[in-house]
Amino acid sequence: MIERQQRKPRSWARRWWQAAFALLLAAVLLLEAVPELSANAFYLLTDGITTVVAGAARVDAGQIIVTGAEGGETDVVLESGKKVTIRRNGTRQFATSRDGETVSALLRREGVSVGPLEMVRVDVSGSGIELTIASDFTYYETVSEAAAFTTVYTTDYTQPKGSVTVTQAGSPGWRDVTYEVVYADGELVSRQPVAEANNTAVTQEARIGTLVSEAQPGDTIASVVRYRDGSGYLLLASGDSLHFTDSMDVTCTAYTTGDPGVGTITYTGTTVHVGVVAVDKSVIPLGTTMFIATNDGAYTYGMGHAEDTGVRGRKVDLYMDSSDECIQFGRRSSTVYFLDG
């Protein structure tokens, strides 16, 4: 397994060097300037920063992978007098490089032939030269890539539902992405990202509103935010929020049209329905919009509107559809939250 770090240059000078390196390598291959290597072979050469893949689409022989070179001096001509270790299928063979000798020439001198689907890894990163012959190689390269920013949303129960307020602007940056590169039988098999680090993109932060003017049917209170002036917000189980200007502890009872003396038209002239609340208009003005829940949390009436009368003091009468519901509800200590509008 080969580990190598490759970083994409960001300056024009480095980009120019990449292009020049690629053109130079292509020219060398086409002209067969390097002895014993043909232009229809497969080459993966690196100067330690830039990687260039060249050669014919069909792999015939002489596949070379060169790693660990410094600067722009990468070549397949070996430095003279270097100890060379040849590894293949778990075996080792030793040699010493000669002046001007290429990888192919050294292998031929040592009686080592490279099959048509084999590759040669040339590693010059150490004090000696490592030649590894195999039909597949896996190595890792790290490149610097552009990184888009992401947006993190948090809820804001004080803002209208669906509204978005950016509290910190995001900005793109760069990130180091490590890829696992697999070559087999002289061909690139896969190049998959396996790790990411040093992301310089700035995350955008935004708040998304949840405030509504009316709760959904069946919604309940998850928590209550109260301020010193008596106002606050109901944070509902659905994720919505309601603003209340004040609240009042009351005794709740229930009534329906089946009760004696109860008709179908309210004091304000509306037809009775679930959500109609009878109040003492001197305590709770007619037209008041409310959200009502019992203090023990066992029952939530929900949205209510003061449209009827017939009670006195800090009491409210909740309209329900049947006598059975009214009997089951009975009399309960509750809280009325007075909503906007």
Image: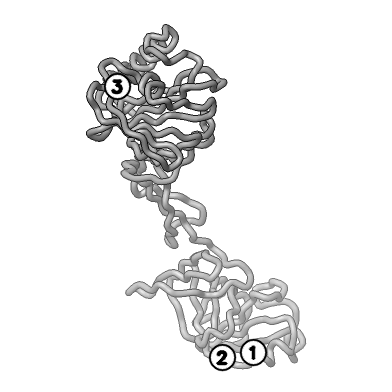
> In this rendering, which labeled residue sits more in front, label 1 or label 3?
3
Pinpoint residue 182: horizontal percent, then vertical percent. Answer: 48, 37
Pinpoint residue 45: horizontal percent, then vertical percent. Answer: 38, 24
| The N terminus: image quadrant | top left
Pinpoint residue 282: horizontal percent, then vertical percent. Answer: 51, 82
Q: Name the residue under label 2.
A: 332
Instruction: Identify the mark nearer the N-term, 1 or 3.
Output: 3
Distance Cα–Cα, label 1 vs label 3: 94 Å
Q: Which amino acid does label 3 sit on?
A: Leu
Residue count near mark 1 (Cα–Cα under 10 Å), binned few <14, some 14–19, many ≥20: some
Q: Name the residue under label 3.
A: 78
Residue at horizontal 41%, vertical 70%? 232
Residue at horizontal 57%, vertical 86%? 298
Q: Is residue 4 left or right of residue 193?
A: left
Residue at disc 1, secondary structure: helix
Distance Cα–Cα, label 2 vs label 1: 7 Å
Q: Which of 312 and 68 is in front in this view?
A: 68
Residue at disc 3, secondary structure: loop
